[in-house]
Image (cartoon, rainbow, N blue to C red):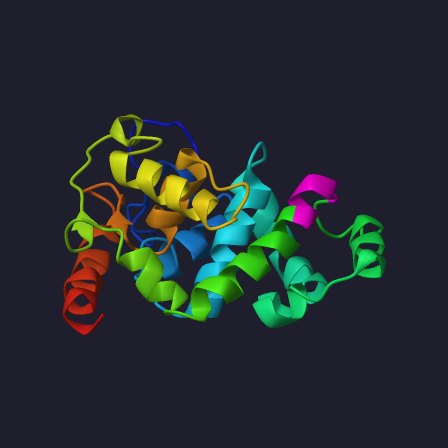
Amino acid sequence: MSAAKTPAPHSEDQPIRCPWGGIETPIYSAYHDTEWGVPQFDDRALFEKLILEGFQSGLSWLTILKKRDNFRKAFKGFEPEMIARFTDKDRARLMADASIIRNRLKIDATIDNAKAFLAISERESFSGFLWGMLDDPPKANKWKNFSDVPAQTEISKRMSKELKKRGFRFVGPTTAYAFMQSVGMVNDHLLACHRHTPCAELQARAKLAK
């Protein structure tokens, strides 16, 4: 995400957004306005987001967003049961697919992560496993500047450690925190951003429902 310190410029017909969600990149503003910070409890959707956050490592999230539909096609809709059965032929197919990020280590990790997902699912939901790591209900922070937002926290460090213990890869503390932001475990929209209050309200309702 952008390291800009203040909310993105706005006009009468454009709301105030976080600095990285400006209108100059519509795909980014749409993601910012409809997905980022919204509590997510669907197992498959959580798995997809965690995998894509791993692929984002070393790249920009905008790059991933532009290729997300291609990723979904290449990885069979991010259905863990299907990915876990990928063979060397599938690996070769993915490495030859220029529409995604062709990184052998990340591709192999995705297959291993699908197997780790299935192992967890034998005992509990993936959603319950992840959300259960929070010490408190989903938190709505009150940042005024994006430069104040941390890259990782104690909870993301713990989540990273537990995921790795279960066999996941490309899930470092920074990746884990980016994941937490995106799925509404923490609300890091700036206080002035038009999405801060709606996401905080969704978090409050999710706290009662989860």
User: Could you tell me which residue is drawn at 40 percent across and 48 percent down?
Assistant: 179
Give the extent of the magenta segment. 102-108
The C terminus, quarter of image? bottom left
Residue 89 location (% of width, % of height): 85, 60
Q: Nearer the viewer, residue 27 or 179?
A: 179
Dominant SS of magenta comes to helix
Does residue 199 appear to the left or right of 42 in the view shown? left
Tell me if I can see residue 9 in this picture: no
For residue 154, which quarter of the picture?
top left
User: Could you tell me which residue is drawn at 23 percent across and 51 percent down?
Assistant: 134
Residue 26 location (% of width, % of height): 50, 52
* Residue 2 lies within the magenta run: no
| Up-down relation of residue 156 to residue 182 (above or below) | above
* Residue 106 lies within the magenta run: yes
| Up-down relation of residue 158 to residue 85 (above or below) | above
Does residue 204 appear to the left or right of 169 in the view shown? left
For residue 75, which quarter of the picture?
bottom right
Residue 66 location (% of width, % of height): 62, 51
User: Could you tell me which residue is drawn at 48 percent across and 49 percent down?
Assistant: 28
| Up-down relation of residue 120 to residue 60 (above or below) | below
